[in-house]
Amino acid sequence: MLNLAYSTDDDWAVRILPSLDEILLDHTHCEKKAASTALGLIFRYQHRREMMTSLSELAREELEHFELCLTLLDERGIVFQRQRPSAYASRLHVVVRDGEPQKLTDLLLIGALIEARSCERMRILSVALPEEKLRTFYKDLLASEARHHMLYVDLAATYAPRDEVMARLEVLAAHEAEVIRTEAPVARLHSAGPQKHTR
């Protein structure tokens, strides 16, 4: 259960296929940022001992995925370089509440939603991509992305009653749905994808 309030439209993959190299580069940056997010939480909330091991394991797995993506880029002759990111993550964070533990709850649940959206998009790629090797690459990542989503939700539920956490997740999921629907039309893993060309 990914707890998303909006499902990606069927032709998203069709729109991004002509810009597949950009998607693969963006995915690589996303794995790096996912590791950074976990490490950032470790540094910010180091007094929360109960989160440390789980977040450390998560960061290591994200870095392993980062390395897999780097290898994929090398194999395809794609240079790993700076890339203008989508505003997706920064727009999600504008609704983070002040004060604790509400802030921590929101940060964890936004992490959960980002992982959920990644999982959904990777599932689409695992079916829609024309190359079997790439389809397998994304299929192999699905279980870990779904697990990361639930890890963040479960961590949030250690600091507030689960019913409150799930209610807040529903609110944040609605916000995420609006963000993903209105993201700039560029080829990124967490964007609406390039606009359709009409004649």
Image: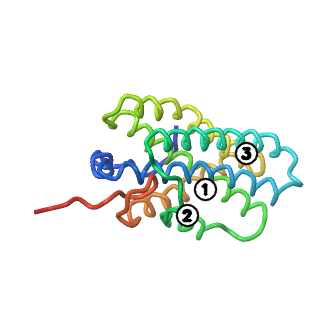
Q: How many residues crowd around disc 2 within 10 Å: few (fewer than 14), some, or many (20 or more)?
A: many
Give the residue drawn at x 73%, y 45%: 155
- Vertical position of residue 4 compared to residue 192: above or below: above
Horizontal side, residue 126 vs residue 33: left or right: left
Callout 3: SS: helix
Q: Is residue 153 above or below residue 131?
A: below
- For the residue marked with disc 2, what is the amino acid? Leu
Which residue is drawn at the image coordinates 41% and 54% (left, top)?
A: 22
Kindly check if marks 3 and 1 are in contact, taking CB atoms under 8 A apart as contact: no
Going by the numbered disc 1, the residue's amino acid type is Ile
**What percent of the width, then of the height, locates residue 25?**
48, 52
Label 1 vs label 2: CA separation?
7 Å
What coloring was used for the rendering?
A: rainbow
Give the numbered dot on residue 92: 2
Q: Residue furthest front?
A: 77
Give the mark nearer the N terminus: 1 vs 2: 2
Dot 3 or dot 1, earlier in sequence: 1
